[in-house]
Image (tube, helix red, strand yellow):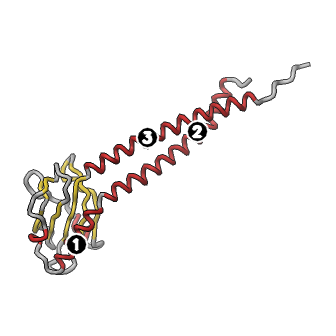
Amino acid sequence: MLSLGHVIGRVLRYWLPGVVAATILTGLVYVALQQTLRLGANDPQIQMAEDTAAALAAGGEARTLVPTQAVDIGRSLAPFLIVFDRDGRVVASSASLDGATPALPAGVLDATRPRGENRLTWQPRPGVRLATVITVVNGGTGGYVLAGRSLREVESRIDLLGLQVGLAWLALVVATLVVSVMVTLLSGLRQPAPLPSA
């Protein structure tokens, strides 16, 4: 008969590798799905920024290309556009936060120019997080186009995903513990009884 210490030792020997495998598997699933959700949040803005930049490069006017109706980016899920000149001054904007166009962090536009495009999460104030795409205007008077929209719904889905993956991890850990205990007990039962001493 196995002692309690031997039983616990064998259970841990079977269980811990299962916990490690479950942690790695659920971690990879979470990261892959989280990145898919976050990167997908850029899709409308990529098209908006590229199309507006192309129109400006062809001689279009920023004030006619940017919607006149302001989007309150602190509340609305609607996408918005901001056009900047070469020096980073706002030429036209449909974004409004506390009654004004929010200011980009210093250096963002400068970092965009060498690459031609910049995709980033912008947080103009606590509680307001935006999926933004900035495109350089190559032609015409130059400048930059920023397209963005709120991440509120996407981040709610990511939070839900985290809960679901966490529950799946817990279920796998419990399942591997049950299997480990069963394997340990069955292996203990199969052990031959000790021979009687002479």
Residue matched to label 1: 51
Vertical order, 21 against 46 (above or below)? above
Tag 1, which secondary structure? helix
Lateral position of residue 163 relative to residue 53, left or right: right
- Residue at 51% x, 48% y: name it: 25
Mark 3 vs mark 1, CA separation in Å: 40 Å
- Residue at 33% x, 55% y: name it: 38
Tag 2, which secondary structure? helix
Residue 150: give x, y in percent of width and height: 23, 53
Give the label, 3 or 2, closer to the camera.
3
Give the residue type at disc 3.
Gly
Q: How crowded is mark 1: few (under 14 residues within 10 Å), some or many (20 or more)?
A: some
Q: Which of marks 3 and 1 is nearer the N terminus?
A: 1
Q: Verify CB contact (< 8 Å) between mark 3 and mark 2.
A: no
Q: How crowded is mark 2: few (under 14 residues within 10 Å), some or many (20 or more)?
A: some
User: Which disc number belongs to residue 166?
Assistant: 3
Lateral position of residue 5 relative to residue 26, left or right: right
Residue matched to label 2: 16
Vertical order, 140 against 174 (above or below)? below
